[in-house]
Amino acid sequence: MLQVRFPLPLLAVLLLAAPAATAQQSLTATLTADIGVLGKITVSALTLTFPDADPDAVPLVPAAGGPLTIVAKARSGLGSTVTLTVATPDDLRSGTDVIPASALSWTASGPGFASGTLASGVARTLGTWTGSGARTGTQTWFLANSWAYASGMYSLTLTYTLTVP
Amino acid sequence: MRLHDSLKGWFVEGALAMLACLATAAPASGQQLDLSVNPANVSFGSADPDTTPIVVAPPTVVTIRVRGLSGGGTWRLTVLADGDLIAGPAAVDISNVTWTATPSPPFQNGTLSRTVPQTMAAGTGNVPQPLSGSVVFRLVNSWNHAAGVYTQTFVLTLSAP
């Protein structure tokens, strides 16, 4: 007669070796983080002064106090272009005397910073970057000296603009 | 006779096998674990990284209850993120999210991971009455994060043993 006998020891071992049942309870929650578009610019000095100088000896007068330190911080959309410009609405003026704004130029150092020349009524690019980040650079201003200038105390206003899309 | 012997053997073996099965499953079958989270949505507001280097979310209340543990049975509450914080193509590593939790013990502080469940609370023995922990999630703020509204889910798991 055919007998089918399950091997008891093996069965017991299998049952005992099976993973012990684990009580468990899980919940799903959600994280939401609003990281908004943000921009901030700092300039190490708010006043530039060019000392008097002989045009023959100093054709390009550097601003007193040395380079400005510029820090441009931007939090933009991924891959967006962040731009830093400098502009002036007018020329250098001393009463009725005028020196064109284009007599002012700068050299720049630091990743993304660029040298340039000022122009009245036109924003000039000082820096360009892609995406978010905090960037630090320097900007050294120069005044093109000339015998043609009328003597006087000239001034103008500069505006730095950081554009973060 | 031989058939009778065979059936008798089956009964004996079956009974023994059943006994082994019950002995193994019994500890878990009596356990009752309860877990709740309120609110289930943790929100970080936008902030200037210079003035707010760490963004703090409103407290989340996590309530646990453990019953039916035998002897020195242990329990554990873990948290595992389903990925990094995502906003379209942009991502912020989930390790920028940490939490502080009280009371300690059994609750403990930690950092979110998307690969390894992190322990938020652990203990030994039953917790017969609901025990609430205050969990405060924190996000490391940075000028390097791309702007966007990021989301991600995470799973809280209360388990024993």
Image (cartoon, rainbow, N blue to C red):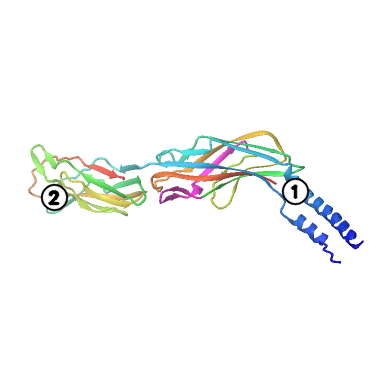
Locate residue A102, reporting x and y percent: 15, 48
Give the side of residue B135 with respect to residue B1, left or right. left
Residue at 21%, 42% (x, y): give it. A158
Please name the residue shown 34% across and 52% down the image: A79
Closer to the camera in the image, B113 or B4:
B4
Residue B80: image location, x then y, percent? 56, 47
According to the image, label 2 marks what residue?
A: A145
Q: Quadrant of residue A24?
A: top right
Q: Residue B53 location in percent, x, y? A: 44, 41
For the residue labelled by badge 2, is the local secondary structure a helix, a strand or a loop? Answer: loop
Between B122 and B3, the one nearer to me in the picture: B3
The three-letter code of the residue at mark 2 reads Asn
Q: Chain of mark 2?
A: A
Closer-to-camera residue (B160/A92)? B160
Question: Regarding mark 1 in the picture, which secondary structure is present there?
Answer: helix
Q: Is residue B96 magenta?
A: yes
Looking at the image, how many numbered discs can be counted on the residues? 2
> Would you say residue B124 sits in the magenta stretch?
no
Q: Chain of mark 1?
A: B
Q: To which residue does mark 1 refer?
A: B25
Q: Which residues are magenta?
A: B83-105
Most extreme residue toward the top is B129
